[in-house]
Amino acid sequence: MISRRLIRIKALQILYAYSKKGDVSSLNAEKELFHSIEKYYDLYLMLLALPQEIAALERKKILQRRQKRFATPEELNPNLNFQDNQFIEKLSNSYELADLLEKRKLNWKAYPDFIKQIYAAFIKSDVYADMMKASGNDFNEDKELLIRFYTEFLVNDENLQEFLEEESIYWNDDFSFVMIMLMKSLERVNQQGRIKLLPVFKNEDDHDFARFLLRKTIVNAEEYLKIIEKHTKNWDPDRIAQTDRMILQLAIAEVLEFSSIPVKVTLNEYIEIAKYYRTEKSKTFINGLLDQIIKSLSKENKIKKTGRGLVG
């Protein structure tokens, strides 16, 4: 499921993209935001389906070698640890995963060259070598090895990085968040249990948070800009980076419009986003300015929070 931090990042990306077009329409921006979130979920499902696709390629290659006229003993009796990995079998037998892939028209069949490239890289990896040495009958060992496929091999694979860049403008930024989601799905499964897929959103509150954060920021953009300018009188507006202004506008929208989100959470989240997308200097600037703005809004009694301790 998508985290609120990624929702904030995606809202920032959409704001930036639409500002470049000169058309910051709330309706169009919301459609693009939810499209990008659906693409994020597509990547989650595609990566869950990837090991079984690579295993299928190995199964095909093993069959071809066995059918050779003068097959060697090794070719006739190959190591089947990877293709028979019990956790990959669970993924292959997941009706929920298969159903979602079919409904969303997702599969790896359109990318045979990519599957060949990633398989060629994988069989040279330490993770694959350890799979070949494994006992082959220990579920927890198979599970740990498959998790290492993602966390040690896949995260460093250049073929995957190129694929992400080519297939979606969102996927490179989404990848690290999708990996967290994948690990949550995989780590909780035992030998008797099934793989339970996570939903797109944790709950309806997160869905509403995505919609209203972007909508309120766009609708009240001028009002929030005036708040920023009030606290940057000694700054040349042209010298404040556009991305910094948008981060500040999103933060102000969240402080003013979301009564259940603690102010400290909002402050920390946008400082982290500034660190990720901007520079250390930018992070310090946003930290100091947001702190000033929040104190001023609090004195003016404009910050309305419903729980105890949510303002301080």
Image (cartoon, grey):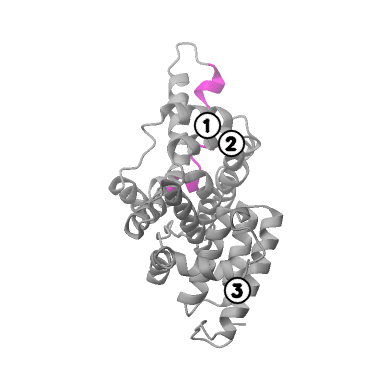
Front residue of 296/72: it is: 296
Q: Are marks 2 and 3 in contact (CB under 8 Å)?
A: no
Mark closest to the chain's N terminus, 2 or 1: 1
The three-letter code of the residue at mark 2 reads Asp
Label 3 or label 1, whichever lies nearer to me, is 3
Q: Which residue is mark 3?
A: 293
Where disc 1 sits, the SS reads helix
Where disc 2 sits, the SS reads loop
Front residue of 209/293: it is: 293
Residue occupying the far bottom of the picture:
308
Q: Is residue 126 above or below residue 10?
A: above
Front residue of 280/220: it is: 220
Q: Is residue 25 above or below residue 87?
A: below
The three-letter code of the residue at mark 1 reads Ile
Where disc 3 sits, the SS reads helix
Judge the density around disc 3: few (<14), some (14-19), many (≥20) Cα neighbours within 10 Å: some
Q: Alpha carbon of mark 2 to alpha carbon of mark 1: how far?
A: 8 Å
Residue at the image point whose x is 63% and y is 37% from the top: 133
Q: Are marks 2 and 1 in contact (CB under 8 Å)?
A: yes
Q: Alpha carbon of mark 3 to alpha carbon of mark 1: how far?
A: 49 Å
Judge the density around disc 1: few (<14), some (14-19), many (≥20) Cα neighbours within 10 Å: some
Residue at the image point whose x is 36% and y is 31% from the top: 110
Q: Which residues are magenta?
A: 72-91
Front residue of 141/240: it is: 240
Q: Is residue 90 visible?
A: no
Label 2 or label 3, whichever lies nearer to me, is 3
Quarter of the N terminus within the rendering = bottom left
Q: Which residue is mark 2?
A: 157
Residue 66 position within the rendered picture, expressed as x and y whole percent measured from the top left: 46, 20
Mark closest to the chain's N terminus, 2 or 3: 2
Q: Which residue is mark 1?
A: 118
